[in-house]
Image (tube, helix red, strand yellow):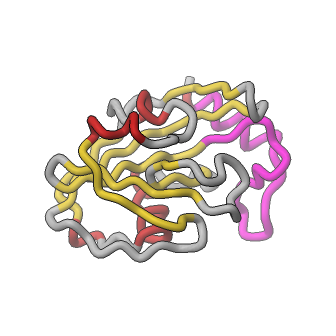
Amino acid sequence: MVDEILSNLAKKLPRFSDGRLNYTNSKEAAIVSVSLWYEDKLLLLKRSDKVGNYKGYWNVVAGYYDDFSKSPQQKGIEEAKEEVGLEEKNILKIQVGKYHKLIDDKIDKTFYVFPIKISLFLQSQIKLDWEHTEYRWIDSKELNKFQIVYKLDEILRV
């Protein structure tokens, strides 16, 4: 089923010059959602006003799954390096969860979410890129205190 969804997206979406899928005007998108954990703490990131959706909301590392030649795990690590400066040597364990189909009627978009949980050896030094304005390491029980992106609480159940 997942391969069929990805294949259909690849057939109908335009591509950038480097071959990645261009989701710019699409009502569907495949994404990786990467939760970074150190012991029992979750890294939450506040989305900047420069991103397309959910400006000012809290999320984990996330990015379009726009290159299907990479596994969700590879794409997740790539996104974490880009968005927060993750160093691979700091990865203790990686788990890839079952994908979720989420339909957000408020923004009229369907997301095919590939959740990835990365446990870390050390609480990494975070280097934010333009997609986020701040970060916090939180206990997962505190998640309801934040304005989170659509269904993040469900996605985190890897």
Name the image quarter holding the N terminus: top right
Q: Quadrant of residue 126?
A: bottom left
Picture coordinates of residue 91, whole percent (x, y): 23, 62
Instruction: Name the residue rendered at 79%, 36% in the picture.
Output: 27
Q: In the figure, is residue 101 to the left or right of 43?
A: right
Tell me if residue 100 comes above or below residue 14 in the rendering. above
Q: In the displayed image of the protein, which residue is found farthest to the front?
A: 145
**Any magenta on residue 27?**
yes
Residue 139: which quarter of the image? top left
Question: Looking at the picture, how far across and down is residue 127, in whole percent?
Answer: 41, 76
Position above or below: 18 against 68: below
Q: Residue at x 72, y 63 (%)?
A: 19
- The answer to whether residue 76 is above or below residue 13 is below
Percent position (x, y) of residue 145?
Answer: 40, 39
Range covered by the magenta-colored residues: 3-30
| Residue 15, horizontal then vertical, whole percent | 79, 57
Query: Going 51% across and 57% down the picture, which residue do you hit?
Result: 46
**Frontmost residue, 149 versus 95:** 149
Relative to 44, residue 96 above or below: above
* Residue positioned 17% across, 47% down in the render: 40
| Nearer to me, 10 or 64 | 64
How many marks can you see?
0
Q: In this view, does 78 lie to the left or right of 67?
A: left
